Image (cartoon, rainbow, N blue to C red):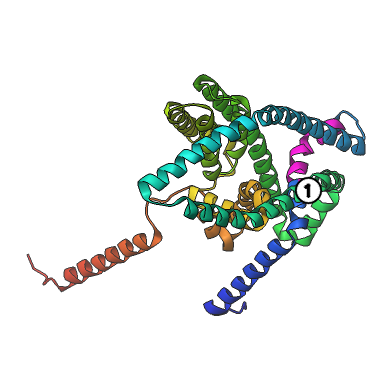
Amino acid sequence: MQKKYPFYIKFTVVLLGLTLLVFALSSLRDIFIPLAFALLLAILLNPVVTLMQWYKIPHVIAITLSLVLAFAVASGIMYFLSSQIMGFSSEMPAFQQKFGNMFSQLQAWAQNKMGISLEKQKQWIADAQSGLKPLATKAVGTVLGSLTVAFLVPVYTFLFLYYKTLILNFLYEVFAEKNMQEVDTVLHNSKGAVQQYMIGLLVEGLIVAALNSAALFILGVKYALLLGIIGAILNVLPYIGGIIAILLPVLIATVTKDGFNTQIGIVIAYAIIQFVDNHFLIPWVVSSKVKINALISIVVVLFWGYFWGISGMFLSIPVTGVLKIIFDRIPELKPWGKLLGDEIPFHHKGEIWTRRKKRIKKDVQTTSTDNNKPETGK
């Protein structure tokens, strides 16, 4: 007979486990981040390796060729972006001069209209600069960490693909034989969800980049292609990235153009693109198995971003999608899977229970009334 523990004991154990998990995620981020990226890349490249092996290419050579192909694609994208950024940096002196003039006008307006002296404004700026120094140090650390991740990810990816059979056998053997079917379903669905999410995300990113660039080009914004691609990359972050993606071209248009017509056009164009993306591209191209509701999407992006920075933001949705698949397959965790999903029930169970209770009470009263009626003879 299985022993049942009180609720407060179960809650304490769960809370302790979550605390240890959060501590581990925060303390071991330098280990977990490259492992997580490598696992996603290994899942994405696994069909390529399998296809090469089907053509009788040896296992090690197939893995190496798939990594070389992935590296070539990533290098091509980085070269294109860096060339665009170099062209943008050549005009930085002009941007700085225009921005300095605008800032001087803003200072004069704050002094004349709001009564804020220049000395007080300079003090505020100095305080802001001192507060930004830790952020700058953290940004440098993030760049160095990204270089470390870039070095470790290919190594880990190769090892994940090379030891794939060993890892899968471990996952099957670590659980009881009666759970073999559930383990197989979870692994199959998780692999399919991650592959479909990553491929769909790539297709969606290309479409959004093309739409952003076309809109900015029509509006006459400088570096429309670069800003459009950056906007598509930021769009990977649900809701938050879309806001940042709008601010960048608005800032460039403010510095390079007079008036506010272009800025208004950018906001309208990006709003239309976001509407098309959220209501057509994401449901049709990206989402089929990774369906996370908007509230959870924002929470997990902020949660993983707090612990793992920008890397955590990009990993948040795939990791949460895999967790949802696991939760949906375990009876005790199904409520958590429903909480993560985007299916909204028409009525909550408390309301259903109340209606059922009222109906039972009414039936009892009706039965009691019928029993108390005097019998009438013919």
User: Can you tell which quarter of the image residue 100 is in?
Assistant: top right
Q: Residues within 10 Å of mark 1 (few under 14, many from 20)?
A: some
Residue 204 makes an appearance in the image: no
Does residue 31 belong to the magenta stretch?
no
The region drawn magenta spans 38-53
The residue wearing badge 1 is 149
Q: Where does residue 322 sit, x and y in percent of width and height?
A: 64, 50
Three-letter code for the amino acid on which mark 1 is drawn: Val
As drawn, 344 above or below 196: below
Pick the front one: 92 or 357: 92
Q: Quadrant of residue 371?
A: bottom left
Which residue occupies 46% across, 38% down? 105
Q: Position of residue 233 (x, y in %)?
A: 62, 36
The C terminus sits in image quarter? bottom left
In this rendered view, identify the residue nearer to me: 261 or 111: 111
- Name the residue rendered at 68%, 67% in the picture: 23
